[in-house]
Image (spheres, rainbow, N blue to C red):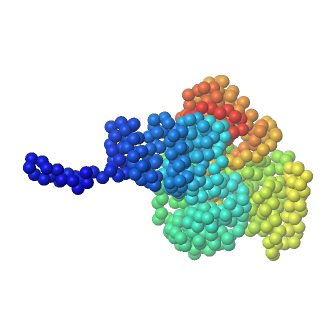
């Protein structure tokens, strides 16, 4: 019909030519879909594919309609053809295929397709949906998917793993992972900031400063880097540089909670307690952070340091309600009472959610087997040890060498080896470190636990008034736990009882659910010794435990409903429930 003239009522009329091409059939297909004529739309998309067989969009549209009609097998055949022949860069096809496989209850194949999508797709268009599907597949397959990276998030999986290691005090391992990321993701500034922290915690100041300089060269206003640099300068007594950075930091009013938290803790460490108090109080007004006992404690410390003693008292009582198993609030309330009675002079308190070191040393005298597990795994304590090993006086270094011998893990051995190789250290200290390292390596070789007895505790306590350096609070972005396999029973370590006690306290469930919580937790701890390095982890474990026990007793419960009571996020509840389920195989239905 193209170009043909038709005579109408004695006149010649131009007829608009019809171009039978892919666009024509595409438009007809879309119009048919709008009218819910699915079969007709499929026919038109097939014609569009015939006209443009190299256009992957029309193939995908045809696959989408087949999926909507329930013909998942045919849909996947088309999607596989797109990936194999038409356009291998159409990585979203893997996500479509995962949906089809899931609808056919072929969950293993759905998982493979979904993992491929996450690892290969550069845009991440369906990230939210992919995360939801990953959760579904977790419960269907009763195990987490093996995901090495998420391409669209440029190293986020590796970065999260490194943050886990930082939060667990495994600084050398975190540094190794983050160093490997530097060349792959040179613009990932958050990873570089955390690499600087890892170096800092290990006492490697020159490398920490060099890494921060690289971040600030790329982004001069990076808040985390400016905060870290200010702390580094303070530890080097570079007062002029510290004052310049304080001037910059005081005028900043960040809105992201993580940045407010970072700025607040930094200002507190720098002695700017009024500014720290203002920022901590801001955070306590937000629903997401109001139930964090560590945050309430930091606000109390800032209040105390600015002579707001009544406010500090109220906040520490609030901490005790949020975290009844902790000794921290009781210790500081007792100290506040002694100050008010004139029994002690006021001192500036540190921004750490644990007892002061001299108080911890006193408590260690009550342990026959050395440092208790929860203290060994506290990253702030570990970082203080590593700090003192590098920068303390001779007496302090000797204390720390013996204390590290009681911890005795990979990080400790790395730190001791580095200390031995450091030029200029006193020969007696090097000899002591070599002796402890030899003992640890021999015990490891023999397959024994490297533990020290009360004699080593006595040596550690012999000069417990030594001053440890102020460690820098790590950037808080995730809440993770790594398992340590052990055959001991739950009863062997009473501090694990805190989790089930918290769950029982918070639970609104009936007796059978509470019994199930106790059974599940005993089963879990008997197989895996979870690290309880923070009160937030305790909340997460308790919430996950209650969720699983409720589901196992067919109680109507969701992640969100549990999260609201515990004051944490639904994703945190989900994470800890998964970790318990991974070991105990409860496999509840999806929330």
Residue 325 in which image quadrant: top right
Quadrant where the C terminus sits is top right
* Residue at x 85%, y 47% (from the top left corner): 369
Can residue 460 be spotted in the picture? Answer: no
Can residue 236 be spotted in the picture? Answer: yes
Q: Nearer the viewer, residue 69 or 223?
A: 69
* Residue at x 42%, y 49% (from the top left corner): 50
Q: Where is residue 402 in the image (x, y as percent from the top left)?
A: 84, 59
Relative height, residue 135 to residue 388 (above, below):
above
State left or right for residue 418 relative to residue 290. right
Residue with the most extreme left position: 10
* Residue at x 76%, y 51% (from the top left corner): 376
* Residue at x 59%, y 71% (from the top left corner): 214
State left or right for residue 91 relative to residue 204. left
Q: Where is residue 387 in the image (x, y as percent from the top left)?
A: 73, 64
Relative height, residue 113 to residue 468 (above, below):
above
Residue 463 in which image quadrant: bottom right
Q: Where is residue 566 in the image (x, y as percent from the top left)?
A: 58, 39
Q: Which of 60 and 532 is in front in this view?
A: 60
Q: Nearer the viewer, residue 468 or 331?
A: 468
Q: Position of residue 92 (x, y in %)?
A: 51, 50
């Amino acid at each position: 019909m193209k170009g043909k003239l038709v005579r109408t009522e004695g006149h010649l009329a131009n007829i608009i030519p019809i171009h039978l091409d892919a666009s024509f059939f595409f438009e007809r297909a879309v119009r048919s879909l709008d009218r819910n004529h699915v079969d007709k739309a499929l026919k038109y998309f097939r014609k569009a594919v015939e006209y443009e067989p190299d256009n992957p969009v029309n193939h995908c549209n045809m696959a989408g309609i087949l999926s909507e009609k329930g013909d998942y097998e045919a849909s996947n055949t088309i999607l596989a053809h797109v990936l194999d022949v038409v356009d291998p860069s159409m990585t979203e096809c893997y996500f479509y295929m995962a949906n089809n496989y899931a609808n056919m209850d072929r969950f293993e194949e759905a998982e493979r397709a979904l993992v491929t999508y996450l690892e290969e797709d550069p845009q991440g268009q369906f990230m939210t949906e992919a995360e939801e599907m990953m959760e579904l597949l977790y419960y269907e397959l009763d195990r987490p998917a093996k995901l090495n990276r998420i391409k669209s998030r440029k190293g986020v999986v590796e970065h999260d793993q490194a943050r886990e290691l930082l939060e667990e005090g495994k600084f050398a391992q975190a540094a190794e992972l983050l160093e490997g990321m530097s060349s792959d993701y040179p613009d990932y500034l958050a990873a570089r900031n955390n690499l600087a922290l890892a170096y800092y915690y290990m006492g490697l100041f020159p490398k920490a400063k060099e890494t921060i300089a690289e971040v600030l060269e790329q982004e001069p206003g990076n808040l985390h880097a400016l905060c870290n640099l200010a702390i580094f300068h303070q530890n080097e007594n570079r007062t002029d540089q510290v004052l310049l950075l304080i001037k910059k930091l005081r005028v900043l009013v960040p809105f992201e909670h993580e940045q407010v938290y970072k700025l607040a803790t930094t200002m507190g460490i720098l002695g700017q307690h009024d500014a720290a108090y203002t920022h901590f109080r801001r955070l306590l007004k937000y629903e997401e952070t109001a139930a964090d006992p560590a945050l309430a404690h930091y606000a109390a410390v800032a209040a105390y340091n600015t002579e707001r003693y009544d406010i500090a008292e109220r906040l520490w009582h609030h901490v005790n309600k949020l975290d009844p198993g902790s000794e921290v609030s009781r210790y500081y309330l007792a100290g506040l009472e002694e100050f008010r009675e004139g029994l002690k002079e006021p001192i500036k308190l540190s921004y750490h959610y644990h007892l002061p070191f001299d108080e911890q040393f006193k408590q260690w005298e009550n342990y026959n087997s050395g440092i208790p597990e929860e203290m060994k795994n506290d990253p702030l304590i570990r970082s203080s040890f590593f700090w003192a090993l590098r920068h303390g006086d001779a007496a302090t270094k000797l204390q720390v060498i013996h204390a590290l011998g009681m911890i005795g893990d990979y990080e400790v051995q790395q730190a001791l080896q580095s200390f031995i190789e450091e030029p200029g250290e006193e020969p007696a200290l090097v000899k002591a470190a070599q002796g402890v390292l030899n003992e640890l390596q021999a015990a490891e070789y023999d397959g024994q636990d490297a533990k020290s007895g009360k004699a080593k505790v006595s040596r550690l306590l012999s000069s417990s008034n030594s001053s440890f350096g102020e460690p820098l609070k790590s950037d808080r972005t995730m809440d993770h736990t790594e398992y340590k396999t052990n055959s001991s029973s739950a009863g062997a370590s009473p501090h694990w009882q805190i989790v089930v006690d918290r769950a029982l306290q918070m639970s609104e469930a009936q007796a059978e659910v509470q019994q199930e919580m106790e059974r599940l937790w005993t089963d879990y701890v008997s197989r895996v010794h979870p690290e309880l390095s923070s009160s937030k982890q305790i909340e997460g474990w308790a919430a996950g435990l209650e969720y699983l026990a409720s589901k196992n007793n067919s109680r109507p419960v969701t992640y969100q409903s549990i999260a609201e009571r515990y004051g944490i996020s639904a994703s945190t509840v989900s994470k800890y429930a998964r970790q318990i389920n991974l070991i105990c195989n409860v496999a509840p239905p999806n929330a």
